[in-house]
Amino acid sequence: MRISTFWYCLKQGIKNICRNILFSLASVATISACIFLFCLFFSIIANIRHMTYLTETTIGITVFFEEGMTEEEILAVGDEIAQRPEIQEMNFISAEEAWESFQADYFQGMEELAEGFADDNPLASSASYEIFLKDISDQPQMVAYLEKLEGVRKVNYSNAVVAGFSNLNKLVGILSVAIIGILLAVSVFLISNTIHVAAAFRKTENQIMRLIGATNFMIRAPFVVEGVVLGLLGTVIPLGVTYLLYSEAVSYITSHFMNSVNASGILQIIPLDRLFPVMSGVSLGLGVGIGFFVSFFTIRKHLKV
Amino acid sequence: MIEISNVTKTYKAGNKAIRKLDIKIADGEFVFIVGRSGSGKSTLLKMLLKEVEPTSGRIIVNNMNLQRMPRRSVPKYRRKLGVVFQDFRLLKDRNVYENVAFAQRVIGVSARKIKENVPEMLKLVGLSAKYKFYPNQLSGGEQQRVAIARALINNPEVLLADEPTGNLDRHNADEIMELLEQINARGTTVIVVTHSQEIVNRMKKRVITMDKGIVVSDKKGGDI
Ligand SMILES: Nc1ncnc2c1ncn2[C@@H]1O[C@H](COP(=O)(O)OP(=O)(O)OP(=O)(O)O)[C@@H](O)[C@H]1O
Ligand SMILES: [Mg+2]
């Protein structure tokens, strides 16, 4: 195709949009809403997954053993636990190590208080295993397994965080698919209508074109251009809005929550420049794709040779 | 060479527009087609354009059998024809220049060539001064010239004109006819449908008379 032909089709497509500005705006608005929600849910889901990942690597299961078990016996049980395939990492913390880190945490600057315990380790039976799983959703079955093990006194784990995150992710996922699906359907309907109206407006012109010897491609191109431009507008606008909102949100959350609540480091927002490329890529594919396919099939149905 | 043999056309409603048509038109000929309203003249032109398919029979244009032509070759075939519609069919939202350029733009002619061709064509039809006018700012005769310019811009081998002087007064009609003769002199086959006996008599060309879908007379050089 010649450059001049390309420009001609582009110009005609834009003319279509301007001539039918209300329908065009409605189409752009629905695609925008659709893409914006996609971006929103995408950000939320990505961040939840990110946090879940952080949780998986920072919150583990701690297993304590019956009093009076020797270190050798505990290590033997540990070897058995280590056979489980769900485990990512496993650390043994002996009673001495536990006592030392306890002292470091609680008697900081007042070491003389700890002196009173002398060699009598008050945490003598606190040898434990710290277990990190590959996938946090395996936690319940892992805990169940550990609790049934011979010699295990207690299994510590954080249930709420895990269940909360995976349930939230599921909920957001279902919600987003439903809402985006509905908006997608509305977008398809509106674009299709817009193209129909434009085609009706150009009926004479299309007829003349056909009789003059224009190819179907040439007759359809302005309408497909129209659809693609609508899709593009409907993508670029929400992407810009998302960009601004997300940067705002990141700086707000960083300044308000990071220091106090987020001691454990779980509440961490993915930086925008890591999230945006994928998000904008998918959005563009979605928006432009809808514009292209809907206009293409609408006009193909409309202009049978 | 246009060869129409044994062609019939029955529209869906059961309307027998063409009953049995045999016409041969040589390259470079100037032919009038006359006949009463409803005699099938426009149907004949539409079949030549492949806008309408004959019910039976065979139409061959420049050695191409229209019935056997694959769909994708139709646009290319139509570019060999120029059409002037009875109702002009100009684009109201575009000026004279753009109306003529349109025919080249939609078949992908380069911008440079269009800039060359359009002014030349406007000169031929005598509209150079009004190239910026919109159709509603032109007289009927002027609009008809724009339509002719558009039909000719792609250098067609055959020009089909359906009542190109239908709405024009004597003076304008004469000018249009002169223009068509000029185009014919450059080697283009010209087929003109008309109701005007006056014009036909004056021009002294071949005249095919149709009635109820058949040819009732075919005379060279003159009166009906
Ligand atoms: N699309 C159509 N569907 C059904 N019948 C049609 C159609 N087009 C034309 N006809 C019929 O075919 C016959 C011939 O029509 P056509 O338009 O070819 O006549 P014409 O000679 O051009 O007449 P006029 O001089 O009035 O333009 C008429 O009886 C008309 O009613
Ligand atoms: Mg007619």
Image (cartoon, helix red, strand yellow):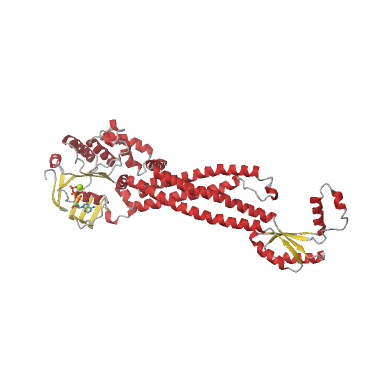
Residue A242 lies in quadrant? top right
- Residue nearer the viewer, B11 or A140: A140
- Residue nearer the viewer, A184 or A216: A184
x, y percentage for residue A151?
A: 77, 67
Q: Does residue B156 appear in the picture of this structure?
A: yes
Relative to A268, residue B198 above or below: above
- Left of B107 or right of it: where is A246? right
Q: Give the residue at x 59% y 51%.
A: A46
- Residue farthest toward the top in the current orientation of the protein: B129
- Left of A141 or right of it: where is A190? left
Disc count in the image?
A: 0
Placement of the N terminus of chain A among the 4 image quadrants: top left
Q: Does residue A135 appear in the picture of this structure?
A: no
Relative to A79, residue B82 above or below: above
- Left of A270 or right of it: where is B1? left
Q: Give the residue at x 24% y 54%.
A: B59
- Residue nearer the viewer, B203 or A3: A3
x, y percentage for residue B82?
A: 27, 44
- Residue farthest toward the left in the current orientation of the protein: B223
Residue A128 lies in quadrant? bottom right
x, y percentage for residue A74?
A: 79, 65
x, y percentage for residue B27?
A: 23, 46
- Residue nearer the viewer, A276 or A248: A248
- Left of A53 or right of it: where is A281? left
